[in-house]
Image (spheres, helix red, strand yellow):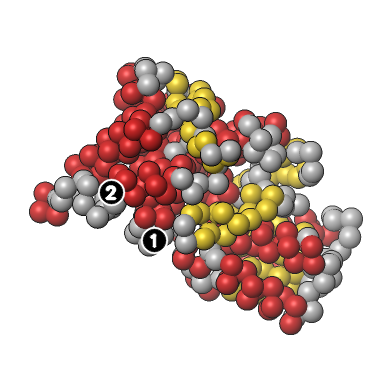
Amino acid sequence: MPEIRVETASAQYSVRLGSGLLGSLPKLLQELPARPSRVFVVTSPEIERLWGEAVLQPLRDADFAVQTVHIPAGEQHKRLSTLERLCEELAAAGADRDTLLIALGGGVIGDITGFLAAIYMRGIRFVQVPTTLLAQVDSSVGGKTGVNLAVGKNLVGSFHQPIAVVADLDTLQTLPRRELRAGLQESVKSAIIRDPALFEFMEQNTETILAADPAALERVVESSIRVKAAVVAEDEYEGGLRMILNFGHTVGHAIEAATEYKHLLHGEAIGWGMLAAIHLGCARGVLPQSDADRMRALVRRIADMPPFTATADRLVALTGSDKKKRSGALSFILPVAIGEVEIVRDVTPTELTAAVEAMLAEVHASQPASLQEPAHAS
């Protein structure tokens, strides 16, 4: 069973990866210096039906006081109003400073639970138990937590590291195919920014990975986590290097906001965002065309990204609300080779608009002919 260490200035913890790990949570909690007074499993009703008993019953058998609190499925619930309700539920149930939270679910549940743990009683412990590929390879590791505002994603949040991450690959076997493929875009991102060996593996084994072959998925998940753990260890609070993990996210988050978080899965939006960044890298002459072609081909093969409707002007305007903007300048992650990106802060609105328009042309081309509209339609 691979165990990956995450070591930052504020915390050190392990990511446990393998099959049949949900039942290991009691042992993990029993090994803590201080036993939790209460355990709250934060999950959605859908995830609880699939995996709730596999988590809850072993904890009950080990005499932990455990109960569930629910978050409705969907990015639209990743709001401050949800967070306030959860705080009230914890307080009403008697949660105290020694309470521990378990985030059982995908990225939305993990982000909300982490933020809840960061602010309840000014900070309590939590464990990430990601059940989606996207959460396993990305959002469960690194301590970023938060919720969305109407104008942008993750604009309110905190850095709060989990005490452990338990990534059970068995949970991926019940994942809808669309969610699996969308989550793989975060692994494509990891490969492009820092792991050419992973990129080559995904190129050569695409169909095996998409068929959810356990060995292939374990290789992809482990490599992706190692990329993120290494970056976070060097830059916990996104002062510099960690920004490379946002490759594809500047435009991707704008797409999510423009479509009101309802039409595309997160990984699908990031896929389109990576294509925009690839266009920009080529336009600037920093990305060889051969590498760009391979990147674009893998992004398109990994997921059937749905088309969407938005104007270039609208998307560019929404990037102005991105949390990566500092001192009035938008940081942008440009690919320069497979396995290497650079952070630039001098992308002009004209350049960004051209890259977004090129990406929208691909969106338009992916629509059935009977549904095609001009790419600039709103």
Q: Is residue 106 above or below residue 327?
A: below
- The label shown at residue 225 is none
**What residue occupies the far left of the structure in this picture?**
370
**Tag 1 residue:** 260
In the image, 104 versus 260, the foreground residue is 260
**What residue occupies the far right of the structure in this picture?**
33
Q: Is residue 184 visible?
A: no
Q: Is residue 18 visible?
A: yes
* Three-letter residue code for mark 1: Glu
* Three-letter residue code for mark 2: Thr
Give the distance between the C-alpha atoms of the residues marked 2 and 1, in whole angstroms.
14 Å
Which of disc 1 and disc 2 is earlier in sequence? 1
Q: Is residue 117 above or below residue 208?
A: below
Position of residue 376 measured from the top left corner of the image (x, y, whole percent):
22, 47
Position of residue 120 measured from the top left corner of the image (x, y, whole percent):
75, 66
Quadrant of the image occupied by residue 235? top right
Secondary structure of the residue carrying tag 2 is: loop
* Foreground disc of the pair 2, 1: 2
Q: Is residue 309 above or below residue 277?
A: below
Q: For the point 37% across and 55% down, which residue is it?
A: 258
Q: For the point 11% across and 49% down, which residue is it?
A: 369
Q: Is residue 2 above or below residue 115?
A: above
Position of residue 71 measured from the top left corner of the image (x, y, whole percent):
56, 71
Q: Quarter of the image containing the C terminus?
A: bottom left
Label 1 neighbour load within 10 Å: few <14, some 14-19, many 20+:
some
Quadrant of the image occupied by residue 213? top left
In the image, 49 versus 178, the foreground residue is 178
**Tag 2 residue:** 311
